[in-house]
Image (spheres, rainbow, N blue to C red):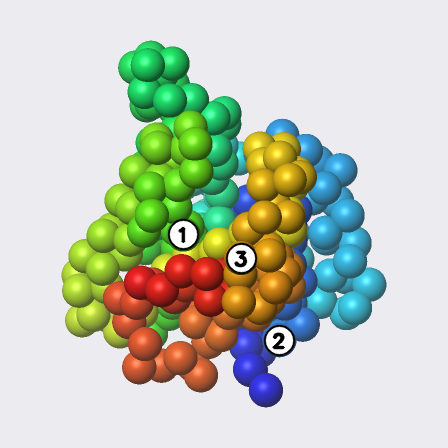
Amino acid sequence: MIELNGSIAVVTGGARDIGRAISLQLARQGASVLVNYFHNPADAESTIAAITSEGGKAVAVQGDVTKSADTDRIAQAAVDAFGGKINILINVAGGLVARKKIDEMDEAFWELVIRLNLTSVFLMTKSALPLMADGGAIVNFSSQAARDGGGPGAMAYATAKAGVLNFTRGLAKELAPRRIRVNAVSPGMINTTFHNTFTKPEVRERVASMTPLGREGEAREVAELAVFLASNSASFINGEAVEINGGIFFS
């Protein structure tokens, strides 16, 4: 049983899909959770309602994690809401934006995808660290795309997620004196809005059939891994990137 009683957690992109599942799982294990969202307050309200209905503690805070003023505000809001230092930061926010090959991309699109998926992790982490307790944990979200280059039109996304892997490794070394562990999760094909939006059903079916376990993953399964990495049950895991893809790809 993972025990997080008394912990304060911040989850970016914490209102839907994998982020929502993580927020719920953290609260079930006793953490007080700041659920960050960008543009859909209904999702955030639904997540908060689900947490509080089970007796958990959570607040929703709107913010654009590609902007340092917002990440500063999000980090401070966690401290103000729960009256202590941040113990756990889980950087989930990100997205593909659109599938574009290099001849279809302009500089603005490239920079948007990099900022959404990589710069956001840097900014949120930089904002949280002065308010974070020693001995805490950071979990960043990469992707299987970081290892294999992604599917058609996902090169910018894959590049950003590869950056998250090395950011994670470098940060794990830098924060070791504070005993703050930094790890990453690299999901494969997970049943989420991401793939509902950007992946054709026939592609999903083909990938699922090629996966040794014969199916897509579920947000709950990714959440359980992320919360494990954030907990003291993973106290000697640091600078690692854990693949969760049903065995279709090995790093």
Amino acid carrying label 2: it is Gln
Compute the Cα span from label 3 to label 1.
15 Å
Q: Residue at x 63, y 60 (%)?
A: 215
Compute the Cα span from label 3 to label 2.
34 Å
Q: Residues within 10 Å of mark 3 (few under 14, many from 20)?
A: some
Q: Which residue is mark 3?
A: 210
Residue 62, which numbered label?
none
Give x and y (percent) for residue 120.
Answer: 38, 38
Q: Residue at x 40, y 52 (%)?
A: 144
Of circles 3 and 2, the one toward us is: 3
Amino acid carrying label 1: it is Gln
First in sequence: mark 2 vs mark 1: 2
- The count of marks equals 3
Q: Residues within 10 Å of mark 2 (few under 14, many from 20)?
A: some
First in sequence: mark 3 vs mark 2: 2
Q: Residue at x 32, y 55 (%)?
A: 129
Mark 3 near mark 1, Cβ–Cβ under 8 Å? no
Of circles 2 and 1, the one toward us is: 1
Q: Which residue is mark 2?
A: 29
Compute the Cα span from label 2 to label 1.
27 Å
